[in-house]
Image (cartoon, helix red, strand yellow):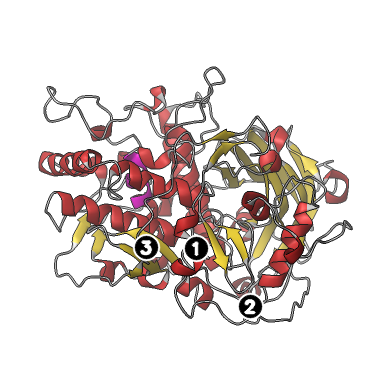
Amino acid sequence: MAFLASTPPGFISPPSTSNKKSLTSQVLLNGKRGQHFKISCNAPNGETRSNPSPSNSQSVETSSAIKLDRRNVLLGLGGAYGAANLIGDKLALADSTNKPFPYPNLTDCTVSYITGDPNTPNSVQVPYTCCPPTPADSPQPFKIPHTDQKRIRPAAHLVDDKYIEKYMRAIQAMKDLPQDDPRNFYQQANIHCAYCNYGHRVSDPEKGTDYLLQVHSNWFFLPFHRWYLYFFEKIAGELIDDPTFALPYWNWDTPCGMTMPFMFSTEKSPLDPSKSNPLYNPKRHPDHFPPAVFDLNYRGAASGLPDLTTVCNNLSFVYREMVTNAYDTQSFLGTPYYFGDAAPRGTGASELLHNPAHIWMGKPRTTDPPTYGEDMGNFYSAGKDCLFYVHHANVDRLWRVWLEQGGQNFQNQAWLDSQLFFWDEKKNPVYVTVKDCLDEEKLGYTYQPTELPWLKAKPIPKLEKEDVAANSNAPSVANAFPATLDKVVKVLVQRPKKSRSKAQKKKKKEVLVFEDIEYPMDEFVKFDVFINDEDEVGELMSKAEFAGTFSSVPHGHGGDEDRVLLSGFKIGLGDILEDLQADDDEYILVTIIPKNAGEKVTIDNVRIEFS
Ligand code: C2O
C-alpha cells in the first residue's frame, strides 16, 4: 500500500483492544447537524484527550464492511452510510493510546476545497493541485545542521535598503525557480494549502484507516508554522547564497509596526521604480495599504474609529491573548490532537491572536465573480502572499516571548514526537519532529529585540463599577443556551465558587468555557466577549470588560455543510473579575457580541470551570 512507503518503520504502536471512555470533556466532530459524535476520555497523564464514539442511535457500520470515497472516510459525511457514525467507529478502533502523528502520506495528497460539500455541485475546489511534489524516495529524518552563523530576523519596519535588496532578490529567486521545483515560491505556498485545507492525510497501516490532517485549531499550530518558516528561510538564503539571510517579522504588536510594512506596499521596487517589486501582491485589501492602521479587532469592515483608538485597542487585544487568555500551555498553544483524532479541537490564544492579520490583509469577498478573501484571507491561498511569512515570523516570535514570560511548552510525548514533512533547501525530502523545533538557538535563528508595549496595556477598569450582574435581567444559561449569535447574547453565568483566596487562585484559574461552538469552516467568523459590561457596543478593547475574541479564518474542508465544531474556546477570568470588583459576586453577566457571520454560529453552553 502506498502509505507504507512513507510511514517510518517502527512508528505505529501496537493496537490496543481497550476502548475506555470516561467523561472529562467532550468534543463534537464535524458532521450533519444532529449527527455529531461526542468524544471523551481521560488520558493517563491527566490531560484531556479524545476517544470518539457515536452519539446518535444509528447503526454503526464496521470498518471492514465499508469501502468509501476517501474523503467521506475522512470527513464522515454524505453517502448512504450513517457517516458520522462510521468515522466514530473507525476512530474508536484506532484511538486507544496517545499516538503522535506520523508525517502525512505523500503519495496520497489530494485536491483541496475552498468551500462546499465535494458531493454537491456547490463545492469549489482549489483550481490547481496544492500538493507539494511527491518525493521519489522516502523522506529522511532531518538533521539540523550545525551553524555558527546566526540568522537574525529583523523587524520589517526597521530594515535598511541593503536588507530590502537582499530580501527582494531572494523572493524573486524563489519565484523564478521551475514550477515543479519544491522550493519554488508557489510550491512553498502549496505546502500551507495542503496542510491547512485538507490535502494531506495520515494512515494507520495496522488498522487500514486514515485521517485528515489539520494543523490549525490544535497544538500543531505553532510548531508547524515554525518549521514551515525555517525551510522557507533556508531556501531563500540558499538561492542568494547567503546562509545568514533571515526573514523579517511584521512587528504588529508595537505601534510603529501597526501598518503593512512599507516594502510590501508598492507595485514598483521601493529601491528602483523601473523594476517591479516581488514583495508586492495585488490580492490584498485595497484599503489596507499604508498608512492604514492594522485593526486587530477587524470585523470585515472598517470600524470608523480614530487611528489612536485602534492602536490602543490593538495593544489591549494583544495583552488579553498573550496574558489573560494564555494562562496555561493548552490555552496558548491549542488543544491536544492525537493520531486518530478526526478533527481540530480547540484554537489556542496564539492562533486567535494571529487570525486578524489574515482577514485584514485579504481582499474582501465578492460573489460575482466569486472570490474568497484571497490571498491572506483564506488558508488555501495565504502562502501566496509574502506577508504571510512575515506575519508568521511575528507569531513565532511571540511564542518565544510567551515562554520568556513564564509560559511552558507541552511535555507530552505524542506532541514532541509528531512528525511533519518538508522539502529542505537542497531539495531533499525530509521529515521533522515537533521536539526538534523547540529551541530556536539550535535552528540557528533569533529575533531582533523589540519593545513589548502591550505588557503595559492591560485593559483598564473604571473607578467605580455598578453591580452589573445583580442589576441585570439577562436570562440564565439554561434559558439562553443553546444560542445562535444572530444578535447580541447576554446571559447570567453562575460561579461555582466565589471569593477564593490568593493561594486558591494561584492553584486553579477561573475560566469561562464556551462549549461546542459550531460554525461554518469556510467563512470568516468572529465574536467578542465582554464581562459585566453596561453596554453592548463592543468597540473598546482597552476597558477591563473586554475579555476575549473568537475568530476563524476560512478554510474549506469539503465536508457536508462545511461546519465545524470546537469545544476549546476559553477565557481566563481571574484578573478581569478582580478589576471589575466582581470577585465576590455569585453571577457574572456575559455579553457575546457577534462581529461577523454570527447568524451561522451556535454555542451549546457556557459555564465556569477551574483549571
Ligand atoms: Cu496556517 Cu496564519 O496560518
> To which quarter of the image does residue 92 belong?
bottom right
Residue 412 visible from this viewpoint: no
Q: Amino acid at mark 2?
A: Thr
Q: Secondary structure at mark 2?
A: loop
Looking at the image, is 202 positioned above or below residue 296? Answer: below
How far, Cα to Cα, is label 3 from label 2? Answer: 30 Å
How far, Cα to Cα, is label 1 from label 2? Answer: 24 Å
Label 1 or label 3, whichever comes before in sequence order: 1
Residue at 73% x, 37% y: name it.
485
Whole-percent x, y for residue 556 in the image? 57, 41
- Most foreground residue, 8 or 299: 8
Q: Secondary structure at mark 1?
A: helix
Residue at numbered disc 2: 97
Q: Which mark is residue 2?
A: 1
Looking at the image, is 578 positioned above or below residue 558? Answer: below
Label 3 or label 2, whichever comes before in sequence order: 2
Q: Residue furthest top?
A: 368
Residue 7 visible from this viewpoint: yes
Looking at the image, is 549 positioned above or below residue 567? Answer: above
How packed mark 3 is, by other alpha carbons closer than 10 Å (few <14, some 14-19, many 20 or more), is some
Give the prevailing secondary structure in the magenta stretch.
helix
How packed mark 1 is, by other alpha carbons closer than 10 Å (few <14, some 14-19, many 20 or more), is few
Label 1 or label 2, whichever comes before in sequence order: 1
> To which quarter of the image does residue 98 belong?
bottom right
* 239 with respect to 375 (left or right): left
Q: Amino acid at mark 1?
A: Ala
Does the beta carbon of the residue at mark 2 sit less than 8 Å from ligand 1? no
Residue at 66% x, 61% y: name it.
511
Q: Secondary structure at mark 3?
A: helix
Question: Where does the magenta region start and end?
Answer: 386-393
